């Protein structure tokens, strides 16, 4: 009886999963394996919101496998040691895993390959499982990656997303013991509004999005009050949804909104190919500028707590704390405010985001922060987003602000983005702080430091 191992990492799904599909083709039986990685715990990457979302994903994956005659096999510890133990226990001849781009993921693959070499078991690493187009599949002449999105997007479009693989109908699992799944209920510190995870919830969200949301995405994706984005990013992060399948389904819908959505999926792939080529950018500047970052703990605390005195910044930060998610326009704004207006190191913001975001991953979180800070791939590194202008443009009536900053519930549309301009009793009746810094002062400070 031949046996293969399908090692689940960032591909916690049954639909369009090349890892699972290849393992089933390889052998008569498989071990669908997930390892609670103690190495991830040591890095601090297993924040409560991601732990909870992961718990949902694993429970749903196990249920899906059981409906097909199988089950998820769970272990905890060092991934390489646990895979090695499983291989020896069942006599597996091949381990299948999705290719990663972080230094941690590629290091894990190298260790797996080395350890398995002495067992007669081979390692098969599958690309374009986490992304729609594999990192490194398209490169410019003379370089191993694209540093500018627009030419990357042209090549990405020409290459095309790989075709989805069929969903298995039956899964025969080898006889091997499993540890119990860790339930969401055992995790503390979860954001109260965190969404439910798992492939089932993700596919329901996907079909609702395709049927009633994506067509208006081009015009409405920056409308903070309208909340007109897909909210699929946490499912993509855990691989509960396939980026390749999303590209094909969106293009089948065919609207300008669907094409705008596909462009955002390409941005996700863009960041993955940058990190694959430059793994150091998870912690180091992509473009070193000699920044002399400020450290003002009171200002940083006000930013984290949503008490900066700038309503749109504060609304977005409070949404993050409550939901473990933030609207993309909000992410750009709060990152610009921290790194440009307060001139605080982007790593401070990136760490805070990773402590809360259900969709927080190294490629997109770190490189989006660098883009906003001007140390990354932005072709206009000195751009500064004005929170008042952004509010009047993308939350004209202050609906989003009032949703998350109830102190401003009774402030008029005219004043909701500039409550410090209220006078007399109107100002006295609003329990909301004054701005921690004047925008002009922050901009001048940034420009002096950068020599702009």
Image (cartoon, rainbow, N blue to C red):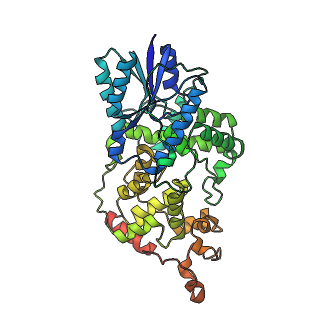
Residue 320 lies, in percent from the top left, at 51, 58
Residue at 45%, 50% in the rendered image: 48
Task: Indicate the quadrant where residue 76 lies.
Answer: top left
In this rendering, position of residue 364 left or right of residue 115: right
Q: Does residue 283 show up?
A: yes
Q: Is residue 401 above or below residue 180?
A: below
Residue 424 lies, in percent from the top left, at 57, 89
In this rendering, position of residue 138 left or right of residue 258: left
Front residue of 182 and 301: 182
Q: Is residue 224 above or below residue 285?
A: below
Front residue of 85 and 217: 85
Q: Quadrant of the C terminus?
A: bottom left
Residue at 37%, 19% in the rendered image: 89
Task: Indicate the quadrant where residue 294 lies.
Answer: bottom left
Q: Please identify the residue farthest to the bottom as the structure is shown.
A: 424
Q: Does residue 383 show up?
A: no
Residue at 58%, 30% in the rendered image: 64
Q: Please identify the residue farthest to the right as the structure is shown.
A: 212
Residue 334 lies, in percent from the top left, at 47, 61
Front residue of 177 and 395: 177
Front residue of 65 and 399: 65
């Amino acid at each position: 009886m031949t046996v293969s191992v399908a090692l689940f990492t960032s591909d916690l799904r049954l639909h369009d999963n090349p890892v699972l599909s290849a393992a089933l083709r390889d052998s008569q039986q498989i071990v669908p394996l997930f390892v609670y990685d103690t190495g991830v715990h040591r890095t601090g990457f297993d924040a409560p919101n991601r732990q909870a979302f992961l718990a949902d994903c694993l429970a749903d994956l196990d249920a899906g496998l059981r409906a097909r005659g199988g089950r998820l096999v769970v272990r905890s510890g060092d991934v390489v040691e646990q895979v090695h133990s499983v291989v020896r226990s069942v006599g597996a001849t091949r381990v299948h895993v999705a290719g990663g781009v972080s230094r941690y993921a590629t290091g894990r693959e190298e260790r797996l390959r080395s350890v398995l070499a002495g067992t007669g078991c081979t390692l098969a690493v599958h690309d374009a499982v986490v992304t729609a187009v594999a990192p490194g599949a398209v490169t410019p002449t003379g370089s191993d990656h694209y540093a500018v999105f627009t030419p990357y997007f042209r090549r990405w479009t020409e290459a095309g997303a790989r075709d989805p693989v069929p969903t298995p109908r039956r899964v025969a699992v080898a006889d091997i013991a499993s540890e119990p799944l860790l339930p969401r209920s055992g995790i503390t510190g979860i954001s109260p509004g965190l969404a439910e995870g798992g492939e089932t919830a993700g596919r329901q969200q996907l079909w609702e999005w395709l049927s009633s949301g994506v067509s208006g995405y081009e015009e409405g994706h920056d409308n903070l009050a309208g909340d007109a984005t897909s909210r699929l990013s946490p499912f993509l992060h855990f691989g509960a949804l396939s980026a390749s399948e999303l590209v094909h389904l969106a293009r089948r819908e065919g609207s300008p909104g669907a094409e705008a959505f596909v462009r955002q999926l390409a941005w996700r792939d863009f960041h993955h190919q940058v990190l694959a080529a430059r793994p150091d950018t998870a912690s180091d500047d992509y473009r070193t500028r000699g920044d002399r970052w400020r450290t003002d703990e009171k200002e940083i605390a006000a930013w984290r707590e949503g008490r900066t005195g700038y309503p749109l910044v504060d609304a977005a930060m409070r949404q993050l704390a409550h939901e473990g998610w933030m609207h993309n326009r909000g992410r750009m704004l709060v990152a610009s405010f921290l790194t440009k207006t307060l001139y605080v190191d982007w790593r401070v913001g990136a760490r805070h985001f990773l402590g809360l975001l259900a969709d927080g991953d190294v490629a997109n979180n770190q490189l989006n922060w660098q883009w906003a800070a001007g140390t990354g791939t932005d072709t206009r590194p000195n751009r500064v987003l004005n929170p008042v202008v952004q509010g009047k443009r993308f939350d004209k009536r202050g609906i989003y602000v009032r949703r998350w900053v109830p102190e401003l519930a009774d402030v008029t549309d005219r004043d909701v983005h500039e409550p410090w301009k209220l006078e007399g009793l109107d100002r006295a009746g609003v329990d909301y702080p004054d701005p921690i810094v004047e925008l002009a002062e922050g901009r001048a400070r940034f420009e002096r430091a950068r020599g702009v």
